[in-house]
Amino acid sequence: MNTILRLNNLTKKFGPVTAVNNLSFSIEKGNVYGILGPNGSGKSTTLGIVLNVVNKTSGDFQWFDGTQSTHEALKKVGAIIERPNFYPYMTAAQNLELVCKIKNVEPVNIDEKLKLVGLLDRKNSKFRTFSLGMKQRLAIGSALLNDPEILILDEPTNGLDPQGIHQIREIITRIAATGTTILLASHLLDEVEKVCTHVVIIRKGEKLYSGPVDQMNASFGFFELMAADSERL
Ligand code: ADP
Ligand code: MG
């Protein structure tokens, strides 16, 4: 069983707006996937649907070959789709202990995860003293506490300075090296090229390309479309 997630003609309409349009792709174990598209192309909506926080309009998706309910499957999925939010006056370690309680996970992995995200030396610092990059890294560590099969990240480097961006990208690569599958939504081509092995390129909710990053080909006009989209923003 190597397919982690499969989307079949997934569609989401918000009134007159088609945010996700007939989208199909699959995610295989052990790879690092990017969903690449400009702002408003439907990345977050797609993630919201497969995480059961947005209702689909039509089509289908299946976790782990449909061997279990979505509810059960999502226990094996780590996701960060919002800004990290922890208790400001509690330390990094205390916040992760609380997450373990809430998720009903033994608090045995906390130091390992803090180390993985480069925060072990800040374990006893209060969350409120953390930079945005550190907060984002703590969120990643938190999402890994129950050793999920896949880690889903929605634009995790948004708003960070160059050093913070570099650290997050390195950590994603490190996590992938431990065997965790990754799905990363990004509007940055260079980020996907640096971090991902595979990519699904979308625009206006529609798939333009899916396949290995090293085979994506500028000839179908994606790069021109992206440039035009970003000029309009
Ligand atoms: P991305 O994450 O790629 O920036 P989104 O999935 O957030 O794109 O948005 C895709 C489209 O759906 C956009 O046109 C956006 O305005 C619209 N959209 C997203 N969420 C909602 C919502 N809750 N209500 C109405 N329209 C929405
Ligand atoms: Mg988004």
Image: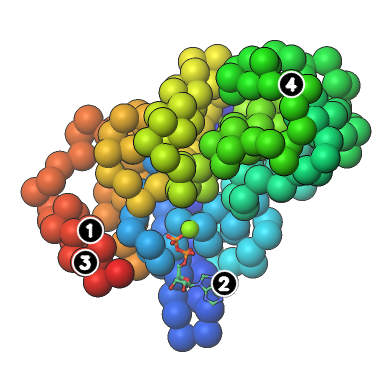
Q: Earlier in the sequence, mark 1 or mark 2?
A: 2
Picture coordinates of residue 116 (x, y %)? 60, 17
The yes-or-no answer for disc 4 within 8 Å of ligand 2 is: no
Q: Amino acid at mark 1?
A: Met
Q: Residue furthest bottom?
A: 16
Picture coordinates of residue 173 (x, y %)? 45, 22
Q: Earlier in the sequence, mark 3 or mark 2?
A: 2
Q: Earlier in the sequence, mark 3 or mark 1?
A: 1
Q: Which residue is mark 1?
A: 226
Q: Amino acid at mark 2?
A: Thr
Real-space Cα distance between discs 2 and 4? 43 Å
User: Which quarter of the rendering shows the N terminus?
Assistant: top right
* Pair 3/2: label in front: 3
Give residue 99's quadrant in the image.
Answer: top right
Real-space Cα distance between discs 1 and 2? 26 Å
User: Which of the two residues, 201 or 92, is positioned nearer the viewer here?
Assistant: 92
Q: Which residue is mark 3?
A: 231
Q: Earlier in the sequence, mark 4 or mark 3?
A: 4
At mark 4, the secondary structure is: loop
Q: How is the image coloured?
A: rainbow
